[in-house]
Image: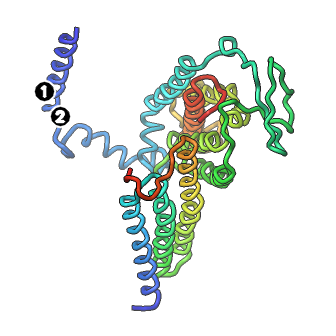
Amino acid sequence: MKIIGLIITVTTGALLFYAAGDFPAWSDPASPASTYLSPHFIEKTMEETSVPNIVTAVLADYRGFDTMFETAVIFSAGVVCFFLLRISRREDEEPETRYYRHVLTGVTIQLKEGHEIPPSADFERIDSMWTPPDLIIKTGCRLLIPFVQLFALYVIAHGHHSPGGGFQGGVILGASVILFAISHDLRTAVRRMSEKLIGILCAAGVLIYAGTGALCLLLKLNFLDYSALAGVLHVDPITARSHGILIVEIGVGIAVLATMIWIYNNISSAGRYRQGL
Amino acid sequence: MDIMNIIVCVLLFSGLFFLTGGAVGILRFPDFYSRLHPAGKLDTLGSFLAMTAFALFNLHHFSLGALLTSLKILLIVVFIFLASPTATHGIVDAGVRAGLAPWTKGEKRR
């Protein structure tokens, strides 16, 4: 079996190398890609979409299908992580002893035989493997997180003019929430952003992208041809393409943000959602 | 050679001095905790001095745009000042909680 695998791998590799000989030379100006496609993008992007950053225009407009399914791949990565790792509550029954901490005094209480304290502001549920939160790290992260999130929004919104866009901005946004989960604990982070909300956001991001495309279809143009949105947004078709790119970038950002947090939550707590790192 | 250039040079070279010291310290100190000491302190101070030098040098031809760029550079300094010591503290804290004993005199380097 191993030998068959080896033969297949070597043959495929040899074929790929053989085919690579037919590629045009590096930066050959006469190659097909640089004769028709690249000059068109370089010369016409500004007048067709009014987006100064050609990469963004190619990614979200000219090659919108590709990016849409990339977003779908990220969505499915999150969903797969959830289905593989998440341990449902029925199998993972509540522990016999529970630990609570009185917030004001820091006194830890142990309750045996399944007793529990109803949720209140005075007592905080903690886990047996719990380590006390560190004031310096908590404060430092609390100071940094708003700026991280502000920068993430800037990266998403400024994708038209500078490097950036939905994927990068979404990752930074997700990282800020993960930083919160690391500096406090997973339970606090999940209380702020519940699993349900994460799942909904994850799907909503893809839905915004695909929905924008479908809306163009309903407005009698091709799928993901944003100039169809001109009537809805009350702008001319070229500006509508620019705005359409922003809309789908926001969708991508939401999907990536939710997926990052979802994967982190599931992996760091081994699917139990009890105590993170 | 005006006074501004001299200030920029002094700041830049003292920044480089501290950054070099940090690098030497990371290589030569004997254990995890003591290596984090130069990594956390000297790098922060070194980048603070170097960044201030950049911000001043950028103001050579004074304009509103240059001032804005300088303010952004100083903003980086602020974030390094917040993030770097916090991260160092977090790493040391993790080491203590994981049960790593600090190095004492006479022991072997590790």
Image coords of residue A236 (percent x, y): 58, 44
Q: Quadrant of the N terminus of chain B?
A: bottom left
Extreme-top residue of the structure: A1
Q: Nearer the viewer, residue B73 or B88?
A: B88
Extreme-front residue of the structure: B106
Extreme-bottom residue of the structure: B2
The residue type indicated by label 2 comes to Phe
Q: Residues within 10 Å of mark 1 (few under 14, many from 20)?
A: few
Give the chain letter at badge 2. Answer: A
The residue type indicated by label 1 comes to Tyr
As drawn, A74 above or below A179 = above
Q: Secondary structure at mark 1?
A: helix
Image coords of residue A79 (percent x, y): 55, 21
Q: Determine which residue is flagged by label 1.
A: A18
Q: Determine which residue is flagged by label 2.
A: A23
Q: Is residue A208 visible?
A: no
Circle 2 or circle 1, nearest the eye = 1
Would residue B108 be found to the left or right of residue A118 on screen? left
Please tell me in which quadrant of the rendered image residue A96 appears. top right
As drawn, B77 above or below B58 = above
In this figure, which colouring scheme has been used for the structure?
rainbow
Mark carried by residue A149: none
Residue under the point 40% across and 73% down: B17
